[in-house]
Image: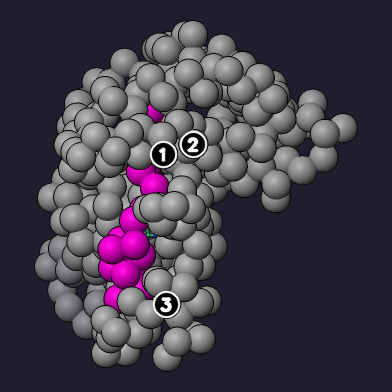
Amino acid sequence: MGHMCMTLLSCILITSLIVDAFEPISTSFIGAGACYFGNKLYKYLYETCDVNWIRFNSSNLEVALNKELFGQHVASRVVLKTVTGYMQNPNPKKPLVLSLHGWTGTGKNLMSQLIAESIYHKGMESGFVHLFTATAHFQHQKHLETYKEQLQMWVKGNVTKCPRSMFIFDEMDKMQPGLIDSIKPYLDYYDNLDGVSYRQAIFIFLSNAGGEKIAEVALNFWNAGQEREEIELKDLEMAITLSVFNNKQSGFWHATLIDKHLVDVYVPFLPLEQKHVVQCGLAEMVARKMKPDKEVVERMAQDLNYFPKEHRLFATQGCKVISSRLDYYI
Ligand SMILES: Nc1ncnc2c1ncn2[C@@H]1O[C@H](COP(=O)(O)OP(=O)(O)OP(=O)(O)O)[C@@H](O)[C@H]1O
Ligand SMILES: [Mg+2]
């Protein structure tokens, strides 16, 4: 509000200065021009819920996925297709709900960051992107009812402010049962609820649920002598939904999200191999403005833990420890 006033004030100031110097007809024109410029400047400096700050670019997302996310051909393909389809649909029937699953350190947070960057000019820094983490935001069991209310209000308030809001729920498998139930109506096929439409909103859930099953499928492919790149979404979908259904402990999964088909797509993240860890290491060096050194990175990758023990196929911690580990090797 304060900024708005300032802009308005400067408009008036500029206009009156100009009015003093020129004859009336052209001054109002110039004054309007100054206001227009002020308005532009305001929009440039302060994030607003419009195309100045929110504009989806499918090819940017495609390039980012190809360049920055290693070894996740299934997830990349599924996300690019789903997000593009949804963002290009002027009248979606429900909000977009993605559920990202997989082993630790395989790029789930990175993926949500890339999606945010393809839509919001400010990416994860955008005021319209909201990240919730189970252990940080909803830690205490006894406060469940309060959390539910707060979450509902937060989502409703923010979608009212900007329909194109994004909500990321991290560590879904550590979330208390019932919590996500409180926002379930928002994920459904409603035209509007209390005058608020949620159809432009995007919900992303992140969890490790299904990670072991996904790894099992990847191992089976390897055992059968098939390429990793031959793995398709349909080979993994069952693995995810089964383990998600069967895990009655993990919070939101026995919410009715699954049987009501509110999740548009389950996105599987494959466990990473040593060559992907090497790619992560090289990328990390580039990010630190260092000259990428394959020998150093390979030495580091060699010392990490892999499973199953006898084949050392998949990195136990994915790329998660790379940035801290690298320090020992350079
Ligand atoms: N497939 C990948 N390609 C490139 N970088 C990756 C990939 N996976 C992980 N990383 C890097 O490793 C770090 C951890 O990744 P991220 O936080 O995305 O993992 P995650 O899947 O969310 O893990 P967790 O389940 O433990 O939360 C990040 O710095 C990320 O950039
Ligand atoms: Mg994560």
Is residue 36 left or right of 325 when viewed as pictured? left
The foreground one among 328 and 26 is 328
Residue at left offset 61%, top offset 22%: 247
Residue at left offset 15%, top offset 74%: 23
Among numbered discs 3 and 2, the one appearing first in the sequence: 2
Label 2 near label 3: C-beta < 8 Å? no
Q: Is residue 34 above or below residue 242?
A: below
Is residue 263 left or right of 23 when viewed as pictured? right
Q: Which residues are magenta?
A: 266-282
Q: Is residue 87 magenta?
A: no
Q: CA distance from mark 2 to mark 1?
A: 5 Å
Q: Secondary structure at mark 2?
A: helix
Q: Which residue is mark 2?
A: 212
Quadrant containing the C terminus is bottom left
Q: Which residue is mark 3?
A: 300
Q: Residues within 10 Å of mark 2 (few under 14, many from 20)?
A: some
Q: Is residue 148 above or below residue 43?
A: above
**Position in image of residue 288 (x %, y %):** 37, 84
Q: Is residue 189 above or below residue 273?
A: above
Among numbered discs 1 and 3, the one appearing first in the sequence: 1
Label 1 near label 2: C-beta < 8 Å? yes
> Is residue 278 among what the camera can see?
yes
Q: Which residue is mark 1?
A: 215
Quadrant containing ligand 1 reads bottom left
